[in-house]
Image (cartoon, rainbow, N blue to C red):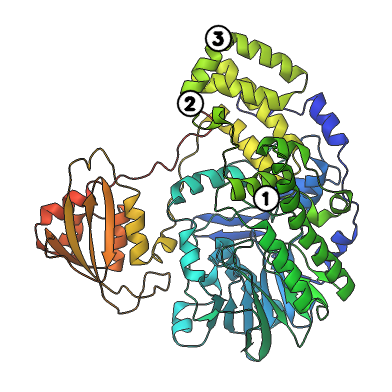
Amino acid sequence: MATEPKPATSHTRQHNAAVMVPSDDADWERARRGLVAQHPSGQIEGPVGHAWDLTRYGFLDSPAAPDTVNPSLWRQAQLNAVHGLFEVAPGVWQARGYDLANVTFIAGANGWIVIDPLTSAACARACLDLANEHLGQRPVTAVLYTHPHVDHFGGVAGVTSEEDVRAGRCRVIAPEGFLAEAVSENLLAGPAMSRRVMYQVGLFLPPGPHGQVDAGLGKAVPFDRAGLIAPTEDVTHTGQELVVDGVRIVFQLTPGSEAPVEMNFLFPDHGWLCMAENCTHTMHNLVPIRGALVRDALGWSKYIGEAIELFADRAELCFASHHWPRWGREDVAHFLRLQRDLYRFLHDQALRLANEGLTPHEIAARVELSPELAAESHTRCYYGDVRHNVRAVYQRYLSWYDANPAHLDPQPPVESATRYVELMGGADRVVEQARASFDAGDYRWVVEVVNHVVFADPAHAAARELQADALEQLGYQQESAIFRNAYLTGAHELRTGSPPPLGARNALASALTIEQVFDAMAIRVDPDAAAGVDLTLNATISDAGPTDGQGAAGGATERWTFGISNRTLWAVAGRHSEAAAATITTGRATLIALYLGDTSVEQATAHGTLHTDGDQHSVAALYGLLVAPTPGFAIVEP
């Protein structure tokens, strides 16, 4: 089976030629405005090679889109390739194009106020170096996290240090609940989400006209591990005002919008409005295809409406942690209104049709952006997609189930596929008919029907090849960068196999609370191995207080009782049980290492980081019931 990408078919060329590309040339002026300097090479060294490499995107210099890329996405990819340090207002600079997100530098009285220090410490450090070189050396006196997605805090060690934060030389400010949410979204379903995100961002797709061209919100995801320094101050309510290094900031909390906790804020003395990731130059996801809790489209729209009421009459500049700013009070207000109406439109139309009895797939086939919304580039589907988002609205209110009992308890994929293929006359017959559909350009039908053959017989070479070819053509046609990445990654893996699994984000694991550690342990219990086990243990956990995200924690000590009952792991805080088979005494770091499998009970005991009073074999027995996840599991085949 050939592993190289294939050219666009005549049907794909025809599809892409008919795409209406946004004609707002002002985006180019906005994206390039205020350029101060650029990174000299576009290559940023990380711990293991290049954390960032813009030289891989030189192919975007071609003004015309190749026929393997939706021309509207090509335009967005070119805009996201505009990189450098930009002055967006006197006293405000942004470094854009050196990570998935932007980092913003505000000149305070004594140093830099840094907003959202990227995913990668290497990238954040390179951006700070660029600012210091061209704008004058300043210490970092404050860091603001707008929300707890990793591309907005993971690079914090590149702009400040735990030592400076603890010494009070740098404040770290975030919305209330930030620390818990920073790890919780990726905790219980973390291995599955880590695998799925490879499809969302096209992590292993080579950049190029036949591969990864963009990520919608930015160019790509850096190759670097994320870190975390805990906030020193919380923003607790809308209207709260802080003076940060001599600069006044008024905050608006927007929980449940683009993130579980998030905040917008205005610099009232200057008219600068930061909209975090609530308003960017794309339709966003109401649920990302990597997986997450479904976001509240109605609440999101209302928060943007509240921002308009609170700030629009004073906002001369609107910037965000992705893409380029907007300038001028009239343009800012127009931008915010359209963003508000975009999420309300998706919400209202999905529910209008649901209340007429349409199912999620029927709704996705019916809803299209209104002409007013479709005419604007910043409401187009470069990241989120109408089809996916209206399904998310349905799911939030009505669940995945469409009320048809035939769909209530379907067969698992392999069993269903085997029966369908048999019913349709066998694998060869299905592939023969599907190839005719491919030749007619009916690629969605091809991937639906040939998927049955691949799952019934993953070794069927002709089916794998046809499925890969159809997925590839669908990828070439997509305006959404993440839809493109998903389709092309599926094609790539059918041709070459699954990639090696990525390592866990241990820097984020170190920020787990003790309760979260026990919750994470519980989902690793092998129920067959735990049959008949009824076991209680006590734990005394030192240094169990609030973590800084780098492994260091406060001096608090917690007492826990935990154990196995009816093949589940339970845990209770604040007490010990007299019925416990043993009591362990250890620290947070060792408890986390035991959960991750980085150490064993025997090793921790030998190293003196775990002490057991009672039956040590019972402790080893409990941890022996935990099984590791399968991070590199198959997706486009069984």
> Going from the N terminus, do you reach mark 3 or mark 2 first?
2
Which amino acid is tagged 1?
Ala
Q: Marks 3 and 1: in contact by CB < 8 Å?
A: no
Question: Residue pushed farthest left?
Answer: 614
Residue 10 location in percent, x, y?
82, 24
Q: Secondary structure at mark 3?
A: loop
Which amino acid is tagged 2?
Gln
The residue singled out by tag 1 in the image is 215
Pair 3/2: label in front: 2
For residue 426, the mark is 3
Q: Residue at x 68, y 62 (%)?
A: 300
595 on left or right of 187:
left
- Above or below, comparing residue 176 to residue 149 in the picture: below
Q: Quadrant of residue 570?
A: bottom left
Say which of 461 and 564 sits in front: 564
Badge 3: how crowded within 10 Å, few (<14), some, or many (20+)?
Answer: some
